[in-house]
Image: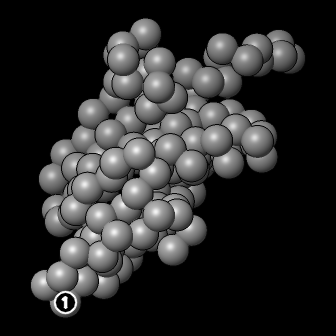
Amino acid sequence: MRKINTDEKGKIAEQKTFDALEKIEKDGNIKSFGWTFPFSEDDLRGIDFIIFPNKGREIRIQVKSSYNQKEEERYSRRGIYYMVVQPYKTREKVKLELLQILEIAMERWKQRKNNFPLKQYLAGFFILKKDGQDVVLTNSRW
């Protein structure tokens, strides 16, 4: 049996994710999605897929064929969801994980929208709208 190399694992992972997203879109759980072109600006920023949910903001996803905690933390800090799709993972399992990501992203969007909608970000300051007033926070750990 031939061993699968890293590039092939990555292509398999992305294809399974694409197939799952097509099913999710067909089922009406999202408006649409896009698969970034290789070496495009989004791809170079670590974004493999952009999902446009029925409500809320776009969801950016990086797909990997193996787990790396430091990479996950790096993508997470940039607002990119990190998803591991190994070659043996079924398309149904990938679909369920994507639906979980959608649920988490929607919950975060609702919290930001209802509690602390971000108005502007300038030089380390968050300017938020709360109860009709601007609230300036000087630290990202609010």
Residue 106 visible within the image: no
Q: Work out which residue is located at the far bottom of the displayed protein and give it.
A: 131
Residue linked to disc 1: 131
Image position of 83 (left or right of 61): right
Around disc 1, counting alpha carbons within 10 Å, would you say few (fewer than 14), some (14 to 19), or many (20 or more)? Answer: few
Seen in the picture, residue 47 relative to 76 is either above or below; the reply is: above
Image position of 126 (left or right of 87): left
Question: Residue 58: image x %, image y %?
Answer: 27, 50
Seen in the picture, residue 56 relative to 46 is either above or below; the reply is: below
Q: Work out which residue is located at the far top of the displayed protein and give it.
A: 39
Q: Quadrant of residue 111?
A: bottom left
Seen at 32% across and 40% down, the residue is 50
> Which structural element holds mark 1?
loop
Seen at 73% across and 18% down, the residue is 6
Question: Residue 134: image x %, image y %?
Answer: 22, 75
Seen at 76% across and 14% down, the residue is 5
Residue 73 visible within the image: yes
Question: Residue 23: image x %, image y %?
Answer: 31, 50
Of the pair 115 and 84, the residue shown nearer to us: 115
Seen in the picture, residue 116 relative to 100 is either above or below; the reply is: below
Question: Residue 49: image x %, image y %?
Answer: 38, 36
Q: Amino acid at mark 1?
A: Asp
